[in-house]
Image (cartoon, grey):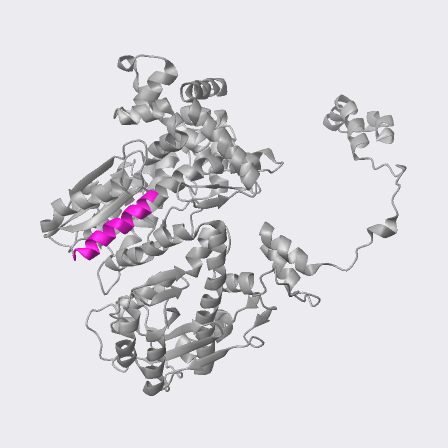
């Protein structure tokens, strides 16, 4: 550094020379800070610091407590690892193993006599782990290839099946001829007739007193339901349990076997191959398929035993038994029911949107002064930032960003921005929903069957796929128009929509106990107007729409840990103004501020936050030294107990409503869950009864110290009902 500054005047680049000159003190301070002094007196015998024999078992125990799963797994795989036997420790975890080295007894059932013996054993078992092998990941289009069962660890049974009548089946059922492949199977010669197997298994699978354990057991329920069997007695799902234990972990059976048992499972890819050499599942040798499927059932049972202990330790078994596991058959019934779609309406909508998109393209070209590829980020960036000289917002590795957040920031600076935002929205909704939805109709049922996922969102919310209806915007005209395409089955049915009103704000009032918020809800006040009056210090009669809008942004923003910058961006005001609004909000609602501080403090001490029912979200970055990373974790800490409790509420409501529908053998069905809304297909004769059931069960799902309001409506389509 000294040499550099002796010759600083010789540096040809003016900018670099000036930076060095202006920051000379900082440069020497930096050198001082990074200098390692080797002349410090050290009074330690370095030989005593030499690593002794590693206490591998102790390390693994510590890694387990800290949930360092990858490190623990790598340590177990080392040759020197020999687990010590101690009466004070759990010694159930075996040495690392796989199917070739693990002690097990797997059986393939290829005779009706052996099947009868298996059925007797399963009937007498208090609980069984079960798995299905099929031809498709789509449960409602899958052909059943076999079933696997396990009653005791290390012993499992595989029952291969064949459908002798599949060539003649074309009856419009969910397991008709359209479900079968043209692949020539070579593993069915010893398989048992499907009808015979299902006939013998039906009493066992439908017996609620026999506890069923599975991995993603909802899939197995749907497969068997499509084959006429209604599985009862769902007791445990290892995938869902893994999600409850650690939502951000890996939930596949392979990962769970590795984590809990140190066991490396045979993968599906190893079974069928990959690429050009990949076999159809019916072409896999029977002994290999039997071992693979029996191994699955065995691992489910083994993992279940370990997870049960873990859930008890975490005091989360109640959440599983009372909410998550009972929800599985409810979701299966919803997925199986599906919802009708007005394809003709979507076709007309698609053509109309095509015209609007083409008009937008011409307007964008006109605003840009030239034609270009609107979908090209590079070309669009050149137009916006070079030709039109709009300010750049964010740079990526490939150039300046033109994503929707950037465009939102540029609103009002040029007419092209609003047109680009409309273009993005229209093209996305057209490709994602308007044109895609008809392709998702099941040919056997004529309906769309959404998949509801329990193990995705870290807050406990359900998510959806194929299609994901959560992302249909309700506040835009085109989003509302898409909802109109979802219809009731026939003239004797209507759709019913029941929506929690401002549920997260009500949960925040309950959790924080803030008197101002609680009083506003108890008095049935307009919460945003009430907040605006308190924050801006005006009489409710003198409120402006802009004040209410700002208060609404603050109310919802606070729940998501919004700061001055975020609020300023949303309200298009300065940060000093937004900082003042937030300060006034906390002044009027002090217990909300206390909730935020207490929650962040608790998260820092314990590493997680939890909902009212005990659902946890771990926050590994809550103590990060990086301010941005830590701030994001703090926002998650503030929001999760609120959003997660609201998610728990609607799940409990779904379970209780379904119990009424099934128990009373009603014709109505629950179809969809989207955010805080439930959608039902209701028979005309049951509208009044269903309204009463739905309102009562949604209001009473979890007791809050503020009223729970549910908006409910009916109509021929989803838009009318909502």
- Please state the extent of the stretch shown in magenta in the rendering: 649-665
Q: Position of residue 501 (x, y in %)?
A: 28, 35
Residue at 15%, 44% in the rendered image = 715
Q: Is residue 702 magenta?
A: no
Kindly identify the residue that appears in the image at 59 percent across and 37 percent down: 623
Count of numbered marks: 0
Looking at the magenta stretch, what is its main secondary structure? helix
Residue 484, located in which quarter of the rendered image?
A: top left
Q: In the image, residue 379 lies at what x, y percent?
A: 48, 40
Coordinates of residue 512 in the picture (x, y in percent): 41, 30
- Is residue 352 visible in this depiction of the protein? no
Horizontal relation, residue 626 to residue 377: left or right = right
Q: Left of 87 or right of it: where is 705?
A: left
Point out the residue furthest to the front here.
Answer: 87
x and y percentages locating residue 152 in the rendered image: 45, 73
Q: Quadrant of the N terminus?
A: top right
**Quarter of the figure that contains the C terminus:** top left
- Relative height, residue 140 to residue 720 (above, below): below
Q: Quadrant of residue 197?
A: bottom left
Q: Nearer the viewer, residue 546 or 297?
A: 297
State whether residue 241 appears in this view. Answer: yes
Q: Residue at the location (59% across, 52% down)?
A: 65
């Amino acid at each position: 550094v000294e040499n550099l500054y002796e010759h600083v005047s010789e540096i040809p680049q003016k900018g670099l020379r000036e930076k060095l000159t202006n920051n000379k003190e900082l440069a020497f301070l930096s050198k001082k800070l990074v200098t390692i002094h080797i002349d410090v007196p050290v009074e330690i015998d370095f030989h005593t610091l030499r690593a002794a024999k590693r206490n591998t078992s102790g390390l693994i125990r510590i890694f387990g407590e800290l949930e360092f799963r990858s490190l623990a797994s790598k340590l177990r795989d080392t040759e020197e690892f020999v687990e010590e036997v101690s009466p004070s420790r759990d010694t159930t975890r075996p040495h690392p193993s796989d199917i070739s080295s693990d002690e097990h007894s797997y059986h393939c059932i290829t005779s009706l006599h052996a099947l009868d013996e298996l059925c007797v054993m399963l009937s007498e078992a208090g609980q069984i782990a079960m798995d299905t092998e099929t031809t498709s990941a789509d449960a409602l289009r899958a052909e059943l290839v076999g079933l696997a069962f396990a009653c005791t660890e290390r012993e499992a049974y595989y029952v291969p099946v064949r459908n002798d009548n599949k060539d003649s089946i074309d009856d419009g059922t969910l397991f008709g001829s359209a479900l079968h492949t043209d692949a020539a199977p070579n593993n069915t010669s010893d398989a048992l007739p499907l009808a015979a197997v299902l006939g013998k298994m039906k009493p066992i699978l439908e017996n609620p007193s026999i506890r069923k354990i599975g991995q993603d057991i909802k899939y197995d329920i749907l497969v068997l339901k499509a084959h006429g069997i209604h599985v009862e007695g769902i007791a445990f799902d290892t995938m869902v349990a893994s999600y409850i234990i650690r939502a951000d972990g890996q939930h596949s059976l392979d990962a769970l076997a590795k984590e809990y048992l140190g066991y490396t499972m045979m993968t599906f890819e190893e079974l069928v191959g990959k690429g050009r050499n990949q076999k159809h599942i019916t072409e896999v040798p029977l002994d290999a398929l039997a071992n693979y499927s029996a191994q699955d059932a065995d691992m489910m049972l083994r993992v279940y035993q370990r997870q049960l202990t873990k859930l008890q330790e975490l005091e989360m078994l109640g959440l599983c038994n009372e909410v998550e596991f009972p929800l599985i058959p409810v979701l299966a019934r919803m997925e199986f029911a599906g919802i009708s779609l007005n394809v003709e309406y979507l076709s007309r909508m698609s053509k109309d949107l095509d015209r609007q998109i083409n008009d937008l393209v011409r307007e964008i070209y006109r605003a840009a002064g030239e034609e270009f590829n609107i979908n090209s980020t590079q070309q669009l960036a050149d137009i916006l930032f070079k030709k039109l000289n709009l300010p750049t917002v964010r740079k990526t590795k490939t150039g300046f960003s033109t994503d929707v957040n950037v465009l939102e920031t540029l609103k009002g600076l040029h007419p092209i921005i609003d047109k680009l935002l409309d273009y993005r929205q229209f093209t996305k909704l057209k490709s994602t929903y308007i044109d895609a939805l008809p392709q998702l109709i099941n040919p056997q049922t004529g309906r769309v069957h959404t998949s509801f996922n329990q193990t995705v969102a870290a807050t406990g919310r359900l998510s959806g796929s194929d299609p994901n209806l959560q992302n249909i915007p309700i506040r835009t005209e085109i989003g509302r128009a898409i909802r109109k395409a979802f219809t009731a089955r026939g003239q004797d049915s209507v759709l019913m929509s029941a929506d929690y009103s401002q549920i997260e704000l009500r949960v925040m009032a309950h959790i924080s106990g803030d008197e101002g918020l609680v009083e506003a809800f108890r008095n049935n006040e307009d919460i945003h107007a009430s907040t605006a009056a308190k924050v801006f210090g005006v009489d409710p009669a003198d409120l402006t729409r802009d004040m209410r809008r700002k208060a609404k942004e603050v109310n919802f923003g606070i729940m998501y840990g919004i700061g001055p910058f975020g609020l300023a961006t949303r309200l298009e005001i300065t940060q000093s103004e937004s900082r003042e609004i937030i300060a006034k909000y906390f002044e009027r609602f002090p217990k909300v501020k206390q909730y935020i501080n207490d929650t962040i403090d608790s998260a820092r001490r314990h590493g997680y936050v939890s909902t009212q029912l005990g659902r946890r979200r771990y926050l590994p970055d809550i103590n990060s030294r990086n301010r941005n990373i830590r701030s994001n974790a703090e926002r998650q800490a503030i929001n999760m107990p609120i959003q997660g409790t609201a998610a728990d509420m609607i799940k409990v409501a779904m379970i209780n409503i379904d119990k009424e529908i099934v128990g009373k053998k009603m014709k109505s069905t629950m179809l969809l869950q989207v955010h805080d809304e439930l959608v039902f297909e209701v028979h005309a004769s049951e509208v009044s009864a269903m309204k009463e059931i739905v309102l009562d069960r949604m209001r009473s799902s979890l007791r809050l110290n503020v009223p729970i309001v549910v908006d409910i409506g009916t109509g021929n389509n989803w838009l009318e009902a909502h």
